[in-house]
Image (cartoon, rainbow, N blue to C red):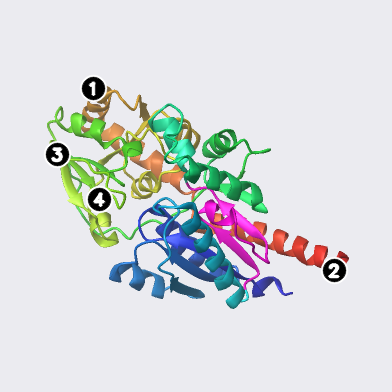
Amino acid sequence: MKEDALRILLTADAVGGVWQYSLDLARGLSVQGIESIVAVLGPSPSKAQLKAASGIEGLTLVDTGLPLDWLARTRTSVRTAGEKIAKLAAGHNVDLVQLNAPALAAEARFGVPVVAVAHSCLATWWAAVKGNDIDPVYKWRSDLAGEGLRKADLVVAPSAAFAEATRLAHQLEKAPVTVHNGRSPLPLPRVAPHDFAFTAGRLWDKGKNAATLDRVAARLAIPFYAAGPERGPNGDSIELLNARPLGNLGERELARRLAAKPVFVSAAIYEPFGLAALEAANAGCPLILSDIPTFRELWEGPATFVDPMDHEGYARAVSEIIGDEPLRASLGKAAKERASRYTPEAMAQAMAGIYRKLVKSGAAAKVAA
């Protein structure tokens, strides 16, 4: 088998960060000579998302209509989705499957190596957000994820901190391999700097802790803009009373906001990686982040850290940076320099190495048998 002849199937969804991750990975893999079949579960991609995917060489998009594991109502529906993904992979004659929803591997049989990427999971989210045992009503979801992680040939996580959290939550023999996510800098328009704070993400997700940021906004003399959905597909929602919601932003509008070099703020109490912070850092925005292991791992040095529940501490940090232009510029430059470590090229190269090693090992095992 030629190294440049690999074909893989990736699962994805169009709801959160896994979509952007999958497109960036597919784009990077095409340079590595790897063709990607991206199977979308859950809600269909928007027209803008379809357009973005169509511009990536070597990517084939399949809208499966299958349920997302975290929105599925029964274990049977997840098992059925996994089986159909396995059939889809066989139909496309792929060399390897990457499941960005590890639960799909729990009960399905794949005839090729399986890489499970743990982007997030109910068990780690619950531990961070709720701080107690998972509600028995939802425990079957966590059990499926754990089974899928254990059955995969290799497990990958986007940060070492989250890899360890995943190991503990699912009692894995060893922590997943760490491959940091990557994001290319957005093309920035020429925009004069403006004094405002900015955040982006799934505002409805309690793990993002937007409620604290809303309290921060009430204490600032400058606007605090929040991009992202306020209502999730699972029915969770948040009402922002002080921060100014912007809704979902396309890349062009997001780039226009970031080009103004606002202070980017996250109060997340649960964050396996944090693509929004990386996008802001790539634009040269100073970062004020919650003091959690993931952010410490990725941004120690360039970022200012605040206890995620300390809204007064956030307000002081934002006001200090906004009021000190040299400090603001210095922190923005440092964040941009650190962001250069986290590129799609580096991510794709690391994943390509994993794929080739697994495929080669699988081929050798078949020959030996």
283 and 183: which one is in front?
183
Quarter-of-image position of residue 271? top left
Q: Is residue 18 highlighted in magenta?
A: no
Q: Considering the image in quadrants, where does the N terminus appear?
A: bottom right
277 and 302: which one is in front?
277
Point out the stretch of residues depicted in magenta.
Answer: 94-119
Across and down, in percent, residue 272 comes to 46, 41
Q: Which of marks 3 and 4 is in front?
A: 4
Badge 4: residue crowd in 10 Å (few <14, some 14–19, many ≥20): many
Q: Do labels 4 and 2 touch, CB within 8 Å?
A: no
Q: Which of marks 1 and 3 is nearer the N terminus?
A: 3
Quote the CA–CA distance across marks 3 and 2: 64 Å
Q: Name the residue under label 4.
A: 229
Q: Mark 3 points at which residue?
A: 223
Q: Is residue 121 left or right of residue 349?
A: left
The amino acid at mark 3 is Pro
Quote the CA–CA distance across marks 3 and 4: 19 Å
- Is residue 81 visible to us here? yes
Q: Which of marks 4 and 1 is in front?
A: 4
What secondary structure is found at the residue carrying circle 2?
helix
Q: Name the residue under label 2.
A: 367
In the rendered view, would you say 346 is above or below 95? above
Q: Which of marks 2 and 1 is nearer the N terminus?
A: 1
Q: Earlier in the sequence, mark 4 or mark 2?
A: 4
Q: Name the residue under label 1.
A: 312
In the rendered view, would you say 279 is above or below 362? above
